Amino acid sequence: MADIKERYLENEFVEIWFQGGLVYEVFKPDTSITVKAAEIIVRDRLKVSDGKTSPIFIDLRNVVTIDNASRSFLAQTEAVEYLTAGAILITNEIQRLLMNLWLKIDKPLIPTRGFTDKEKALQWLEQFKYLN
């Protein structure tokens, strides 16, 4: 039986759902993330998490900008509530360099890695499923 999307939510920035033990966030084309957008995204992700802890897969390829305040916010307590780890799908090595800089500066409170290969990202997240 194929996994189905559970607890699906959509807002102007992202589609979010729970499937197969993971939360998924897939950003819409040409998205810019401000603090207000980040707060909305986290609010909706918390609704999808529904008090259950799991890893998250974030497809960031459509995001064009994320401001500094948003990056700091997304690394902190509220933004990672009910999450065990995060895999972020990016487009290229330049984005990877920027992400690695973010990881060093803002130090997310959960294990977080960037990937250019979706399957590798999902495989890495498997080790973080069902950790409570």
Image (tube, helix red, strand yellow):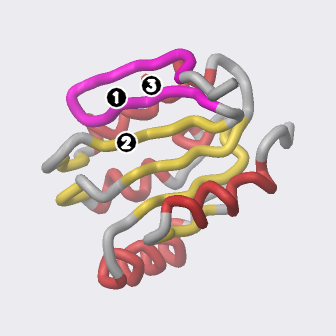
Q: Position of residue 86 (x, y in %)?
A: 59, 54
Say which quarter of the image contains residue 130: top right
Which residue position holds label 2? 26
- Label 2 to label 1: alpha-carbon separation: 14 Å
- Label 1 to label 3: alpha-carbon separation: 5 Å
Give the amino acid at mark 1.
Ile
**How many C-alpha atoms fall within 10 Å of the one at disc 3: few (<14), some, or many (≥20)?**
few
Segment colored magenta: 5-19
- Label 3 to label 2: alpha-carbon separation: 15 Å
Compared to residue 24, the image places residue 99 above or below, namely: below
The residue under the point 53% across, 77% down is: 104
Give the amino acid at mark 3.
Arg
SS category of the residue bearing label 3: helix
Q: Can residue 71 be found in the magenta stretch?
A: no
Name the outermost residue toward the left.
30
Between 8 and 101, which is closer to the camera in this rendering?
8
Which residue position holds label 3? 43
Looking at the image, do the residues carrying marks 1 and 3 touch, with CB atoms under 8 Å apart?
yes
N-terminal of the pair, mark 2 or mark 1, is 2
Which residue position holds label 1? 40
Give the amino acid at mark 2.
Val
Nearer the camera: disc 2 or disc 1: 2
Main SS, magenta region, reads: strand
Q: Position of residue 25 (x, y in %)?
A: 44, 40
What numbered label is drawn on residue 7? none
